[in-house]
Amino acid sequence: MEPRDHRSRKPLAGLLLIVGLLGMLITTVASAQPRCFNEKNRVSPGRLLNNLDLAVRGQATECDWAAEVAPGFPNSMGGGSYNIPVIAAAIALVKEPVRSGSWNMYTWWDTYLRGELGMRGSVWNYGGKELGSSIYQHFNIVSVLVVHYEAWRTNRTSLRNLAREWLQATFAIHALAATPARPTTIHDRTFVEQVPGGYTGPWIALAGMRSNADSWKRSARAMLFARATGLGTNLAGEPGNQKRIRQWIEARWNGPGGNVYGLDGTDRQHLRNVLGQASVSSRVTAMLDGIHTITRLHFVRWGGKRLTLMERNHHGSTVPTYGMIYYPNGEAHVLHPWIRTKDRQGVTAGKARLYLSSRMMVADNFPQTSGVHGQITSTIGNLPAAPPSYHIILEP
């Protein structure tokens, strides 16, 4: 057989044209996927997480996740969602890390994680404008878990290290706010709500932006904290997409530096000690080095009593929860100066203050120029008189 002449292949030109047209067709078909909307015709983080699950397991995605990729998102803190672009970027890292002329996910994640970790100064803050969100934070945690796993799998050491540091910081924050069990009752200024049983394991009593009353009982992020630190949990009610991703990467992780959650055995023990012994070691505080938040975030502990308070809200889409205190008898009391049925209307910055000497914490929803909620002040009094075991503050 004569060797082929690779210098002159006119028939190949036609083949290239066909392949090129086929590529255009494939691109067209891919972009013709439906948007990742929910029943309210809004982009759904849950549907995006479904697609991240499919991507991690090497399966075809079900909706147009690429439409939610925001290449410039980590460059500066604007408005909008702080979870949807993160989930979409995790999908992109797995399926298509670099799209010529559109994005480079290695750069995107480096920029985002460095900002979250306080390495870019005041241009970004940990948690963005969804700091501590009891509705949305678990989406970001799962996304960074996937980044940590994928960076190890593809030998991206620098990115893996950044993801590990972010996970360590997040679980350190959770340890400072964690309680041994979910509360049995939640007390607001206007109601007492019974919390249904079923789930066993820690609960994260964390004040946060975009944290409405319906989200207080959720335990998705607490389950991740439990898996990360080795605390017991029955994982009852875990979202299916989170569970599938978690189980997939847990079973396949064989990377350095501990588990897929970025914690080695000593890390896990020190974080469990925060919960069990009210002891915050230098190893735990080192996980928070450099972390700064868009508003002051307080963590206070008196024995079995745990308090968190966030001083200002910075997101206008969903009401925040300014403060929480958990008592050993299973009661949790919240600072929530909003009308529950209007949790996505009339959202303002408000403010909250902690007065330890006066044994109280107070939050308001001022200014209420829209009139949706009216001016409401929420107060929790009778805080412990004894000096706290710790009072740790994250600051801008």
Image: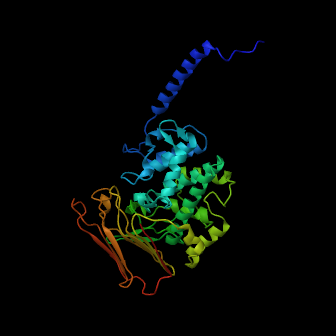
- Residue 192 percent location from the top left of the image: 37, 71
Q: How many dots with numbers?
A: 0
Q: In which quarter of the image is the C terminus?
A: bottom left
- Residue 381 percent location from the top left of the image: 35, 80
Q: In this view, does 384 lie above or below 208?
A: below
Q: Is residue 103 above or below residue 10?
A: below
In this view of the protein, can residue 201 be seen by the observer?
no
Q: Residue furthest right?
A: 1
Residue 176 horizontal side relative to residue 7, left or right: left
Residue 213 horizontal side relative to residue 1, left or right: left
Residue depicted at 50% across the width and 48% down the height: 108
Residue depicted at 60% across the width and 72% down the height: 283
In this view of the protein, can residue 260 be seen by the observer?
yes
Q: Is residue 2 above or below residue 180?
A: above
Say how the picture is coloured.
Answer: rainbow
* Nearest the eye: 349 or 251: 349
Residue depicted at 43% across the width and 49% down the height: 73
Q: In which quarter of the image is residue 261?
A: bottom right
